[in-house]
Amino acid sequence: RFVFGASVTMLWILGTWSYYILPALGPVYVFEDFLPRIAAIFPLNAGTQVALLQNYESVHLAMAGEPVTIIPHMGIAAMPSLHVAAHFFLFLWARWVNSRLRNLLLAVSVLTFIGSVATGWHYLVDGLAGLVLGAGVFFAAVGIQKTLTRFRLLPEGRSPQQ
């Protein structure tokens, strides 16, 4: 449990820092003609994207010295997709511990990946980077788990692979 919790924390910290290191906006924010097409297909999604885009524009106005209101929790970033990373990480973990949820989590990972691109939240590369981040954190967690168990810093108990 400790390693799982620590690795989920590591996933979100690394993902958040990657937004600062590799800033990117999803296609719906970059290509002006993309948002109306998305709005026609996904009307509920489009309303949220418009609100996020308006907040993003407010950030630029504030940086130019304009007195505007910014809503911090409405920040937008695309690279990598943390939703894809988290779902893929959970699938890999469920597979490692031989959970019955592994097939469901694989399906959720695939649907999240496809949906994030189809709705304009992410580019394909954002989803791929999310897969790499999720897998990287998972393999780091497994290595940490094995190391802590080997040095008897974690109880041996039942192996997650049993």
Image (cartoon, helix red, strand yellow):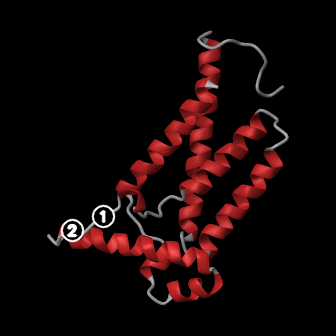
| Furthest-left residue in this view | 65
Question: Which residue is label 1 attached to?
Answer: 70
| Label 1 element class | loop
Question: Which residue is label 2 attached to?
Answer: 62
- Determine contact: label 2, label 1, CB under 8 Å: yes
Q: What residue type is labelled 2?
A: Ala
Which image quarter holds the N terminus? top right
Q: Quadrant of residue 147?
A: top right
Q: Residue at x 57, y 40 (%)?
A: 137
User: In the visual, does 105 lie left or right of 79?
Assistant: right
Classify 125 as above or below 10.
below
Q: Which amino acid does label 1 sit on?
A: Ile
Q: In which quarter of the image is residue 42?
A: bottom right
Q: Which circle's residue, 2 or 1, is located before the other in the chain?
A: 2
Percent position of residue 151, x then y: 60, 11
How many residues crowd mark 2 within 10 Å: few (<14), some (14–19), many (20+)? some
Q: Which residue is drawn at 40% across and 74% down?
A: 53
Count of numbered circles on the image: 2
Residues at marks 2 and 1, CA–CA distance in whole angstroms: 8 Å
Q: Residue at x 59, y 52 (%)?
A: 85
Classify 49 as above or below 141.
below
Which image quarter holds the C terminus? top right
| Label 2 element class | helix
Q: Residue at x 45, y 45 (%)?
A: 14
Classify 13 as above or below 73.
above
User: In the image, which disc is placed on residue 147?
Assistant: none
Q: In front: 152, or 119?
A: 119
Classify 107 as above or below 143.
below
Percent position of residue 150, x then y: 64, 14
How many residues crowd mark 1 within 10 Å: few (<14), some (14–19), many (20+)? some
Percent position of residue 56, x then y: 35, 70
| Furthest-top residue in this view | 152
